[in-house]
Image: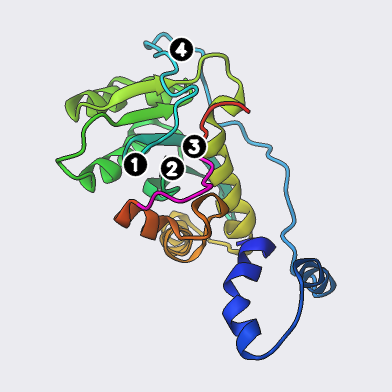
Amino acid sequence: MGGRKLFEILQPFLLEHKIKIGRDGFFDLLQASDLLVRRKKRKVYTTQSYHWFKKYPNKVKGVLPERPNHIWVSDITYWKINCGHVYISLITDAFSRKIVGYHVADTLEAVETAQALKEALNDLPKTVKELIHHSDRGIQYCSAEYVNLLHARGVEISMTENGDPYENALAERVNGILKEEYLYDYTADNLEQARSVLDFVIGLYNKERPHLSCSYKTPELVHKNGHEVKGAKRVVKRH
């Protein structure tokens, strides 16, 4: 979960055992113990935006999410397992940072990405109104099946406009967290095992990993209770 969050979580333990260590010293300890997260470069492209499907304007630029289920951001990432690559479709709530829908498959077909959306919509309360779904212009998100699911639930559609990753920065950030802090430490022999690992990892992310942008509360807690966190970073546009 990263050293900063880990240091915050360990504070009660450190106080109880009268252990005095600052954040810099804590990071030195992690480094000496070879426990720092190593970043890896992305090599696989998952977005194919050159297609004839309708593309939608960016409706979230400069907009701050005001509550859970106000803005969802979506993206697709990859994970290298023992038999090749699998592709993970993620939908994240921009307010709480909770992953509300996900699906892993061995292809990039639109029907697979739609499974993540179906999961998110199944758990969406009927009372929710004015939800915006934001994504890149990939063919999966512009496909008839995906768009029809959003229209049927009355969800507004928003997309990046110029291919700049900063237009979907939060979704990219969540991809990085899952891979660098969790998935790179696991392996799987096949798609079935990959799905089992992903279920476990997303449970850790949603329920146990505190977010700096949520004042060190977990996404599950913020999403469930709708906490407005002082000092939280709710920007979804480019800084």
Mark 1 lies on residue: 67
Helix, strand or loop at mark 3: strand
Q: Which residue corresponds to the image point at 27% horizontal and 25% vertical from the top-left?
A: 145
Residue 91 visible within the image: no
Q: Nearer the viewer, mark 3 or mark 4?
A: 3
Q: Mark 3 belongs to which amino acid?
A: Ile
| Amino acid of disc 4 | His
Three-letter amino acid code of the residue under disc 1: Arg
Could you tell which of marks 1 and 2 lies nearer the N-terminus? Answer: 1
Q: Circle 4 sits on which residue?
A: 51
Is disc 3 in contact with disc 2, using a CB cutoff of under 8 Å? yes
Determine contact: label 4, label 1, CB under 8 Å: no
Q: Is residue 66 magenta?
A: no
Front-most of 92 and 210? 210
Q: Which residue is mark 3?
A: 76
The quarter of the picture where the N terminus appears is bottom right
Q: What is the spatial separation of the Cα atoms under label 2 and label 4, in whole angstroms?
A: 22 Å
- Mark-to-mark CA distance, 3 and 4: 17 Å
Mark 3 to mark 2 CA distance (whole Å): 6 Å
